[in-house]
Image: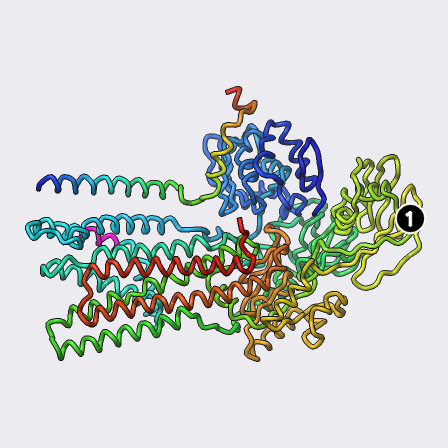
Amino acid sequence: MSVIFLLISASTLVAGIFLVAFLWAVRSGQYDDDRSPAVRILSDDTPTEATENK
Amino acid sequence: MEEHVVADAHDFCCHGCKAVHDLLRDSGLHTYYELEKRPGTKSVANADEARAELFDLPEVREKLVEFNEDGITRVKLHVPQMHCSSCIWLLENLEKLEPAVVRSRVRFGQKELTVNFREGDLKLQDLILLLRRIGYGPQLTAAKGDNKPVGVPRMLYVRLGVAGFCFGNSMLFSFPEYLGADISDAILLKGFSYLNILFSLPVLLFSANGFFSSAFAGIRARRINIDQPIALGIVVLFVRSVFDVLTGVGPGYFDSLAGLVFFLLIGRWYQAYTYQALSFDRTLEDFLPIAVVRLRNGTEEHVGVGDLIQGDRILVRDQELIPVDGILRSGHGHIDNSFITGEPLPIRKNEGEAIRAGGRQRGAAIEVEVLRAFSDSHLKRLWEEHRNVSSERPLMPRTIDAVARRFTVAVLLIALFAGLFWWWYDPSQIWQVVTAVLIVACPCALALSMPFGYGHTIRLLGKRGLFLRDAEVVERMSFIDAVVFDKTGTLTAREAWDMRFTGAPLSEHERSLVRSLARNSTHPLSAVLYSGLKAPLKEVGNVNEIPGQGISGTADGVEVTLGSASLMDAPSFTPEKGEAVVHVALDGRHRGHFIVRKQARAGMGDSVRDVHLGAATYLVTGDLTVDPEVAAMFTPEHTVTGCTPAEKAKFVKQLQKEGRRVMMVGDGLNDAGALLQSDVGVTVSESSAALTPASDAIVDASALHALPRMLRLTRSAHRIVIASLILSLLYNVTGVSFAVSGHLTPLVAAILMPLSSVSVVGFVSLAVWWVARREALVSHT
């Protein structure tokens, strides 16, 4: 029976980690703009002179 | 503009875009053109409000510069022109155009651009010029202080996350009880219950905060609002659940509590999410240049508009707004009053003539002597006039308030009577029954139906070019039974022109010469010629623009002159009212003239007639005559001509006194009073960067023809919301019948609460979408 207490504390801990991760994501501004990051990811790896020289 | 420009196997919407293309190709940024089919901004040729050197003024810098450390400066700029993924891409790759830029980031929703750059290598002013060159000149206005942030506040996400976290865990801990765990697990169940209390604390104390503060605000204002029964329900849920656990009666309703707050917060989030990032409340200062050039003892100095006094001389350059009333002292005035009246054709002013504030100079710089300080100007008076008007706007009852009032009273009465009954029948059950009634009556689904129903409508309308201030406007729009239109700039467009040529017909080659030259001028008539003539473009040299008169240049070896009769040996010709004339001479020989007349926007005739099916339509205009094309849209007794701005507002007020709910559709500052007086003021905007007076809604000019369908959509949305209110009331009635008979177990509550919320939200969203589809306001793909 005691195993369930261990499982509960473990699951709550994991859930708590996710909550903290979410709070961090909000605070770092990831939810402020939901349009430009979607575009940003498409445009980074185009080889241009500038990136080739790096 | 339907005209395309083709170069390098690309199709451009305008020459501005081609210029950008050349610039980008040289910098290796041509992938820009693979992102969107027709990239580029619509408003490349738009007037920039402020001159670049103003950006180096200390008071301006203070507003824009966020920090300045180790030679790196960060500025935050407002760039309203960004509108597509190509814009984001280009603006975030500024460092490839200008090595001194370290990093540039866009916040699209806010139309905001943050640039880090080395100020040692690049002056702020040059950065502004670079942005302007690629068509994204930042906007700078004299408005004080920062605008309030738009979009979803971060705190709301935090509250939502915490509530979701607790909801999930509570549900997990409540399941064993619902599924009928063994009695032998009593200690375990007890432990789960205490954990639930722990998880419900952050929900109660943190996530639900907004509902409590709103409920208290309502109590202080002695008004019943929807958040009061919600707050009451939350408190009762918590107290009853803790009581149940402590006395060992049962597991409590903790999962319902967390779920309730979670769903309600989703509603709040959606409400904030659908709120458009457009400024609807503008002050006069928003329209004014941040500083003007004052001439004193032969030197130019920048001063604030408010510091101008009578007798000052100011310099007004091409495309600049004249902020004060004055007298033209030198130069040729060519004043475009479209901001005031919606009339785009410039008026000619000669030296010594009076100029009213609010006009925009087109052409070479002029010197103006200040006649009155800004605070006494015509513009300021016009503005103040309608400020007073707006306080008399009739109040429209909000459905949600009416429902909340009756709902709260009904719930309290039911709880009272149920309590009395059980007091007589079995006093030991009073506590259980009364709390159960208050719990189950918590209007969760009720509170969700409006943010989702109207929020969805706002979103769908926004995609079609009608931007509403908030959900309340949708409801007000659904009650509209009279629509008042302004004429100039609203029904007639800036771009819709009827153009005729009188004289010996021009050959294709000659037309292309005229068109090529017209492209070199910013004058609106030139723009008309440019877009109206269908002919290939030629290189033009020796361009010489004579302000207020016309333009000349050489193309294909032919000297082309466009403009007034005085520029060439032309017979004088007096146009009719509302018409303008452009004379054409090729190699010094007069060839004839174009007569340009404004035309109604495409589709407006049908549109007005369509509106008329559901509401009375009126036309008010400052002009004394109405062109037959527009006049035919309205019945003569519903047409009012020669209105001053104040009379327009009075007209709207008169209609309201007759019991009508009035929508005003206008564009210029002369409609501002009427826009504010009306129940729903809709401003017509040619481009998102254009300045528009304060209103409840902004409609893209190209979407104006869909107005009748949009009106019908809001009416349907209102009916859908009413239907969903009834649906959620049925859930409440079902729940209450469980509660008064003493059968509201935690399991019933746990099923009923999410079921009602999800089904109401689903019903509302689908129904609104379906209606929008029927009105062809949603594309089928």
| Camera-side residue of B634 and B566 | B634
Was residue B198 drawn as part of the magenta stretch in this picture?
Answer: yes
- In the rendered image, the vertical position of residue B157 relative to residue B117, given as above or below: below
Please indicate, yes or no, whether residue B614 appears anywhere in the rendered image: yes
Residue B126 percent across, percent down from the top left: 61, 35
Which residue type does callout 1 highlight? Arg
Badge 1 is on which residue?
B591
* SS class, disc 1: strand
Was residue B587 drawn as part of the magenta stretch in this picture?
Answer: no
Quarter location, residue B663: bottom right
- Whether residue B214 sits left or right of residue B613 in the image: it is left
| Camera-side residue of B491 and B80 | B491
Residue B50 percent across, percent down from the top left: 62, 46
Residue range highlighted in magenta: B197-203
Quarter location, residue B204: bottom left
| Camera-side residue of B74 and B44 | B44
Q: Which chain is home to disc 1?
A: B
Our reading of the magenta stretch's main secondary structure is: helix
- Give the residue displayed 92% in from the left and 52% down from the top: B570
Residue B645 percent across, percent down from the top left: 65, 68
- Whether residue B587 sits left or right of residue B477 in the image: it is right
Residue neighbourhood size for the residue with mark 1, other residues' Cα within 10 Å, grouped as few (<14), some (14–19), many (≥20): some
- In the rendered image, the vertical position of residue B251 relative to residue B40, given as above or below: below
